[in-house]
Structure formats: C-alpha cells, structure tokens
Amino acid sequence: MQLIECPWCGSREETEFHYGGQAHVAYPEEPSALTDEQWAHFVFFRDNPKGLFAERWSHSAGCRRWFNAVRDTATYRIHSVYRLDDPKPVNP
C-alpha cells in the first residue's frame, strides 16, 4: 500500500484519500456567459500527461482537507505535496 503525506496529518495509507482531478484549473469568471461547448470543455477536458502532474487530493478519511500533490502518472509515485495556498512547484 502506498503512503500519501497529508500536509496536516502526516503519512497515511492511500485508502484514506480521494483524487480530485487536475490542480490549478481556474474556474471561469463568468460561467453563465459560456456556451455549452465551452462549459463542456471546462468540465471534461483535462491534461493527461505521462510524467509529473499536479493534482488535487482530499484526505477524506482524516482531516477532510484538500491539498495538491505532484504525482508521476507513469509510476504513480507522489513526488511532493503542498497546500492549496502554496505556489505551484516549478516542475511540473
């Protein structure tokens, strides 16, 4: 079982966490002004790289807080975790 480092609780088993999608995706300033096609693109289209990728995670069985993690999508290894208010790492 993989351990994930929660910024608040420390290392915990991966079963305590839930994946929340790509990190750093800005919510549209005026969502009501978007066409159906633009809204669908915002909701469903995300990057899917092979390698390092910034993601959102929730410690759902612990403190219930959200945080970001940089994970290698090829190996599933988490390289770093950081709070939502911390800046995005240089890599990725």
Image (cartoon, rainbow, N blue to C red):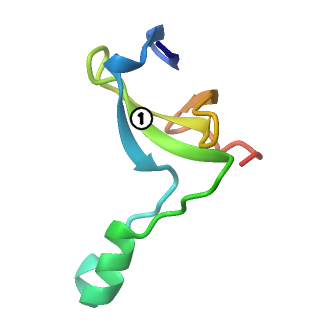
Badge 1 amino acid: Trp
- From the top left corner, tell me how far across and down residue 56 is, in percent: 45, 41
Residue appearing at x 62%, y 57% in the figure: 49
- From the top left corner, tell me how far across and down residue 46 is, in percent: 47, 64
**Outermost residue to the right:** 90
Residue appearing at x 22%, y 82% in the figure: 32
Residue appearing at x 30%, y 77% in the figure: 40
Q: How many marks?
A: 1
- From the top left corner, tell me how far across and down residue 76 is, in percent: 57, 33
Residue 87 can be seen, yes or no:
yes
Secondary element under disc 1, as helix, strand or loop, is strand
- From the top left corner, tell me how far across and down residue 91 is, in percent: 76, 45
Tell whether 34 sits left or right of 26.
Answer: left
Residue 58 is drawn in which quadrant? top left
In the image, residue 5 above or below residue 31 = above
Between 61 and 52, the residue placed more toward the observer is 52
Residue appearing at x 41%, y 49% in the figure: 21
In the image, residue 1 above or below residue 55 = above
Mark 1 closeness class: few <14, some 14–19, many ≥20 residues within 10 Å: many
Between 20 and 63, the residue placed more toward the observer is 20
Residue 28 is drawn in which quadrant? bottom left
In the image, residue 37 above or below residue 12 = below
Residue 28 can be seen, yes or no:
no
In the image, residue 58 above or below residue 12 = below
- Badge 1 is on which residue? 57
